[in-house]
Amino acid sequence: EAGVVQSPRYKIIEKKQPVAFWCNPISGHNTLYWYLQNLGQGPELLIRYENEEAVDDSQLPKDRFSAERLKGVDSTLKIQPAELGDSAVYLCASSPSGGGYEQFFGPGTRLTVL
Amino acid sequence: KNQVEQSPQSLIILEGKNCTLQCNYTVSPFSNLRWYKQDTGRGPVSLTIMTFSENTKSNGRYTATLDADTKQSSLHITASQLSDSASYICVVKTWDDKIIFGKGTRLHILP
């Protein structure tokens, strides 16, 4: 069974440019998470979806970040415009349902903003 | 404020030795605690999960303990191997589905 798929794995952009990350969760997993992870830190939740509904986006910087999961399967996270401080690893995770199950993480997208 | 504190921040040991990583939490209402292993360049992978009533749980050479009274957990690694070099992250979940991550302990195993 395929795990959580993320693309691209690496992205280098100049500041003020837009960037998008894509995540395809494990088949059948209703819950999808986007996290930001800085070097030497634990993941920080950006947004959590239950199917197509964003149930927790309180930590998402909505002035520049947006996310969608239109059909309740794959998801896209966008930053526009990117800032130097956005350089980090963006992790996607999925779980069967709700928050009580193990989260399965993708390999992440490493973003570098120059 | 819900917090998860891990210590030490980093640890270096020789291959074959044992080590113990610590996790202290101030999270309420507590539901469960997981330890994740994160290899460099990879996403975290769950090692163990412990609920309020569980004191010890093992997964091969990994043994996690939980003291719900003192709100402390530990992860003990026995007979370390080079492949154990990774970050180990303690994650606590609340009953209202909040998930709080620690910053992790970076473990280096030397041959």
Image (cartoon, rainbow, N blue to C red):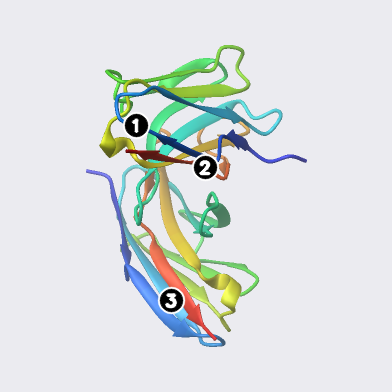
User: Which quarter of the figure has residue A87?
Assistant: top left
The answer to whether marks 3 and 2 sit on the same chain is no
Q: Nearer the viewer, mark 2 or mark 1?
A: 1
Residue type highlighted by circle 1 = Glu
Q: Find the distance from the CA under tag 1 to the CA under tag 3.
A: 42 Å
User: Which quarter of the figure has residue B67?
Assistant: bottom left
Mark seen at residue A14: 1
Q: Find the distance from the CA under tag 2 to the CA under tag 1.
A: 20 Å
Query: Is B106 on the left or on the right of B18, as rendered?
Result: left
Q: Is mark 3 on a helix, strand or loop?
A: strand
Mark seen at residue A49: none
Q: Position of residue A94 (x, y in %)?
A: 58, 35
Q: Earlier in the sequence, mark 2 or mark 1?
A: 1
Can residue B62 be seen at all in this image of the molecule? no
Query: Which chain contains the residue that carries disc 3?
Result: B
Residue type highlighted by circle 3 = Thr
Query: Which chain contains the residue that carries disc 1?
Result: A
Q: Establish if B47 lies above or below B74.
A: above
Q: Mark 3 points at which residue?
A: B20
Q: Quadrant location of the C terminus of chain B?
A: bottom right
Furthest residue toward top? A70
Question: Nearest the camera: A33 or B75?
Answer: A33
The residue sitting at 35% across, 47% down in the picture is A38
Q: Establish if B70 lies above or below A4.
A: below
Residue type highlighted by circle 2 = Gly
Q: Residues within 10 Å of mark 3 (few under 14, many from 20)?
A: some
The residue sitting at 38% across, 43% down in the picture is A88
